[in-house]
Structures are given as structure tokens and as C-alpha cells.
Image (cartoon, rainbow, N blue to C red):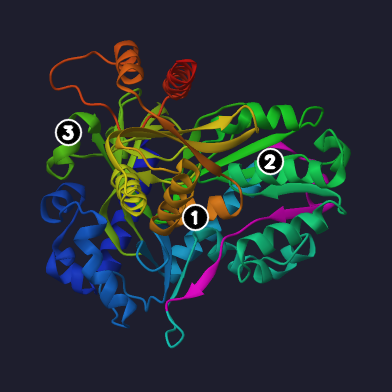
Amino acid sequence: MPASVESAQKKVLAYMLRKGAQTEYGKKYRFSRITGFDEYVRNVPMVTYNDIESYIERLKKGEQYLLWPNKIQNFAVSAGTTGKGKHIPLSEDRLRSDQRFMRKVILSYIKQNPNFFHFFLGSHVSLPGNIERLDPKSNVRLGEISAYLAKLSPGWLSLFQVRSPQTMIQEAWTEKFDRTLEMAVKSDVRKIVAIPSWALRFFQRALEITGKKHIREVWPNLRLLICGGEALNTYRPHFDKLLEGLDMHYIENYGASESYFAFSDDLSRSDLRLIVDNGVFYEWIPHPKEHKDNLQGQKTVPTWQVKKGVPYSLVVTSNSGLWRYMINDVIEFTDLEQPRIKVVGRVSEIFDRFGEAVESHEAQSALEEAAQKAGATFSVFAMGGLIDPDIGAPRHFWFIQWVDEPRDIEEFTSSLDASLRKINRHYHNRRESMGIHPPVVLNLTKDAMYKWREKHQSLHAQTKMPRILQEEDKIVDMVALCREARQGTHAK
């Protein structure tokens, strides 16, 4: 690893320890006495959201100097509903870091495409999230990180936007999507910024509205799609088909409500450049899935000691007041010189192919609530998602083994959908925008489950049926087996 990476990361850590020493958290763990990485990891514990939630609740009540020496009134919703999800503090320092990150993205693209006049001529489309107050009497604001960035975008950028980001962050999703699309199909759109599932829906609806067969007939000068929040590779085959005939460039950002970490700085590569000098200090837990029940007890390594091809779980210290905060992603380094990374999965059972971040316990809770309403009982279930080839859009498939089946499966499916929307904000937003289409519930017979497990699992006494199916081939096989079993039952 180049000395510059080590130097940059040590500088970031030293700066944040100086700032953090003024806070309640910093005084508790004696930040002022910590002189380097080894002391930092010995004296400060790794944490999850649950470990620091009490601090965040106090911040929302107006207390200051708890985690970071700024008054914090903005929070990014990381998961769950607005009222109940994880609320990540957004300091002014953090928001400035995010702005710098986005400038790096644009400057990197312009360097690779010297004809930047084409980039700025014409119109730009963005689809940011929303910001809302915690309650009518409070100055505390909750929202998606994309909305905060839109709010902070420079005024001159609005000259190129189809619609003002300042207006869109206050609108309900359906209204925002429809109004933006209505104006976009009348404009010379050249750049789109959106998560992949919303971009896919945007393209599909543009063709429906205009009656055109190809996006190049709607926006012949479209060149750039900037996206994040979901795995771009899932959508690339569908984008390539819809955008056939256009000389398209794709930039993928990797980040979360906790911070932005990496982006596509080379259009010819699929891996991402890790940014090491922008308010985030990284630690890495090797082989996290082997230790997922005791991750907080594992030893971490700094970025200057990582190795290529080893799976790591990410731990971040950021200038929003997160100290050794654990991120659920699994990452591998593809290059140590830059350094460059790729995201290869999640540590715990979670489905996040379309940016919904549905954890297994959330799926369980939604299913239990819907089953109780329907007077039904289930024993085993699994869920996963695909871009359904019949509709060309993402949707979830639920495979449920019934003890007492609901009388009306369509009514049950709607209830399940509503329950998960209530539990998980990201899923709700994607359903509202039709970024994810309504779910499908299939009967998981014992015969279908056995055939699937025989093919996809090494069956032992302790082998459990997974609740979250990640790999597309496994989901496709499960759909086929369940439908085959249903047809066999109907034939009888």
C-alpha cells in the first residue's frame, strides 16, 4: 500500500480525535491521550447503531457536544420508517465532505471526457429523496442523504436541472416522479442522477408516455447515468437494452447514510476507487462471515495493511460523530495502489439488490403481521428478488410453507406488502415509485423445498433453509419449483 494512503488515513484519524476530544464520547474514552491507530482500537470499542442510539436520541432532543462538536439538527434515515429507523447524525463537517466527494466524481468524469461542454449543455435530471421535520414543533430534520445533497447543491446547477432540487425534496414521491418525467420528455436530457431502480422505472415510463420504442428517440444526447444505493451490475443488462444506440457512461457511487466511500473513477472498470482523505477513517475485519456472531470481538486492520482478494467487513470513524461504527457490507480490495474495492455481499441476512435493505427479521415481522391478520399460519419461508422478465422490473418473491393457508392469497399478498412498507422505509419508497413492483407469494411445498435444497445446499443435520435468497439462479429455481408444484396440484 502506498505511503500516501497511510499518511492520509493517519491524518484523518488524528484530526477527528482532536475534534472528538471536546465531546462527551471523547472524554469518556480519553481521545486526548490517544496518539495513533493501535491505541485507538485498544481504547475505543466497535459499535453498532444500538450501542449509540441513546446518544442519538439525546441529540434529537437538542443536546450538544455528545458525539461531534457541532450542533446537529439533521439526520439521515438509514433504514426503517422515518419515525423508527436508524437516524445517522449529519454534522456540517460531514455534509461538506459529501459535497467534496461529489465534486471529485464530476471532476473525475470531466478528466476522462475533455468535451465537458456536452456535459453541461442540455438538461440534467435528478431524483432526490425527501426531508421532513421530526415533528411540527421541532427543528430536527430527517431525510435521505440524496435530499440533503440536493439541498446543498450550488444555485447555478439549477440552471441545468429539468426541475429544481430544492422543490423536489419537499414533494411526495409520486408527484415528484411524475412532474419530473413530464418535463423531462420535453427536454434535451444529457445526465440523470438516480438510484438504478428509479432510473429503470424512469426510462420505462418515458417510453410508455411518448410511445417511442427506444430511449435514444426520446433523449438522443443522453450520455451519463450517475447512481448509487443499489448494485449497478444488477441493472446493467436492462439498461444496455433500453439505452441501445446511445454512447452511455455509468458512474457508480458506493456509500450509505453513514458516508460516501468510493466511486467509479475509471469508466473502463467495474471496481471503485476508495477515497481515503475525506473525513472517513477505515478499519477492516478480515473474513467477517466466519465471525459474524462475534464481529465486535475481532481484530481490525487499517487500510494500509489490507490484502487483495480477502473479504473484509467495514468499520468507519467519520466526521459526523461515528466512532468505530460497523457497516454490514463485505468488501474486497482489487488494487492496493489506488486503492480500489468491490462490494461482494453483506455480513448478515439482508436483501439489498434493489436498495431496499430488507433484513431477515423485518421480513419475518412483516410476514407474521400479515399472517395474523389473515388467520393463517406458516412454518418455513424464504424471500428474494429478481428483475421479473415478464415485466422488466424488480419485484420480490416470497416462498411460504403453510400450516393454515390464507383464504384469499391476493388479499394476503397486499397485506404483506403493506406490512413491509410500514417496517422498512427504503422498501416503501421503492414501492411508492414502482422501483419495485408488487410482490408475488408462492406456496413452498415440502417437495419443492427438498428439491431446491438438494440442488443448492450441502444437506447436514444442522443445515437451515435460508430466509433470504441472494443468488439469482437460486431464486429462479425456487420460482420454477413452486410453480411446477402448483401446476401438479391443479392437474390432480
Does dot 1 land on a helix, a strand or a loop? helix
- Tell me if mark 2 has few (under 14), some (14-19) or many (20+) residues whose alpha carbon lies within 10 angstroms of its own: few
Say if the magenta span includes residue 173: no
Residue extending farthest to the bottom is 137
- At a point 61% along the width and 67% down the height, the residue shown is 169
Q: Amino acid at mark 1?
A: His
Q: Quadrant of residue 471?
A: top left
Indicate left or right for 403 with 395 as reference. Answer: left
- Residue pointed to by mark 2: 111
Say whether residue 86 is visible.
Answer: yes
Does dot 3 land on a helix, a strand or a loop? helix
Residue 446 locus on image (x, y percent): 30, 21
- At a point 65% along the width and 48% down the height, the residue shown is 106
Q: Quadrant of residue 138?
A: bottom left
Q: Amino acid at mark 3?
A: His
Indicate left or right for 347 with 429 as reference. Answer: left
Q: Is residue 302 above or below residue 475?
A: below
Q: Is residue 125 above or below residue 207?
A: below
The one of 351 and 138 positioned closer to us in this rendering: 351
Which circle's residue, 1 or 2, is located before the other in the chain?
A: 2
Question: Magenta residues, as a range?
Answer: 112-134
Residue 182 locus on image (x, y percent): 80, 57
The span from disc 1 to disc 2 (Cα, nearest Å) is 38 Å
The span from disc 3 to disc 1 (Cα, nearest Å) is 32 Å
- Residue pointed to by mark 3: 291
- Tell me if mark 3 has few (under 14), some (14-19) or many (20+) residues whose alpha carbon lies within 10 angstroms of its own: some
Say if the magenta span includes residue 115: yes
- Residue pointed to by mark 1: 428
